Amino acid sequence: MNDQQSPQTHSQAGMRAFQAGEYEVAADAFDTAAQGYSAQGDLPSAAEMQNNRSVALLKAGKAAEALVAASGTDEFFAQMGDIRRQGMAIGNQAGALEALGRLKEALEKYQQSADLLKAAGDQASRAHLLESLSALQLRTGNHLQAMATMQAALESKKKLTVRERFLKKLLKVPFRMLGR
């Protein structure tokens, strides 16, 4: 891939590499795309590519680099008034923080991201994020909170799998017992 190609071409190459499980190749392509978009003055696309790069780096096992890639993009999207992409960027930061073992910070970022995604009306992304938050809450011993978070995740989904429908019914039991 040569650097004379358009940022869009690099972005598409990054997506193909990501889907093929070639996460480091994807991260490099997204980085090149981000630089190209920046050079063109398309800062929203550059920030989006940095978020894509963050996800690819996290999948490649490079959590510290993933955190750096996503850092600041949430602030950029906030200034633009794009709360959906702001929420996604914070979610990417949360995933990197979790992988780095910075669990308290990750919990805070996951919650902040979930709130923004709810405000943006992105129920699908919010549901996925709440599942990650619930799993982390379980790991940190917040069992009741984890159940409530998982219940919110399942409520956010339009279509549930058989397993998810069973889990949703199962989660109602302890809350009925607690009078919620």
Image: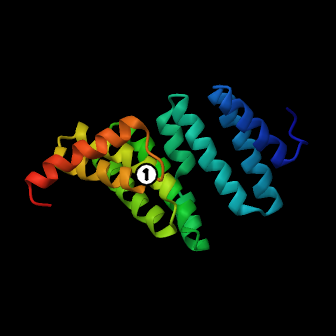
The C terminus sits in image quarter: bottom left
**In front of the other: 171 or 144:** 171
Q: Residue at x 91, y 42 (%)?
A: 4
Res 57 → quadrant: top right
Q: Residue at x 15, y 53 (%)?
A: 175
Horizontal arrangement in the rendering, residue 44 relative to residue 79 (left or right): right
Horizontal arrangement in the rendering, residue 40 relative to residue 93 (left or right): right
The N terminus sits in image quarter: top right
Q: Is residue 33 above or below residue 87?
A: above
Residue 100 in view of the camera: no
Q: Residue at x 43, y 58 (%)?
A: 113
Q: Percent position (x, y) of residue 46?
A: 70, 55
Q: Percent position (x, y) of residue 141?
A: 17, 41
**In front of the other: 104 or 159:** 159
Give the labeled residue for mark 1. 127
**In front of the other: 82 or 5:** 82
Q: Is residue 101 above or below residue 51?
A: above
Residue 60 in view of the camera: yes
Res 76 → quadrant: bottom right
Q: Percent position (x, y) of residue 12?
A: 78, 41
Q: Label 1 sits on what residue type?
A: Ala
Q: Is residue 61 above or below residue 177?
A: above
Q: Residue at x 48, y 53 (%)?
A: 158
Horizontal arrangement in the rendering, residue 52 relative to residue 162 (left or right): right
Q: Percent position (x, y) of residue 114?
A: 41, 58
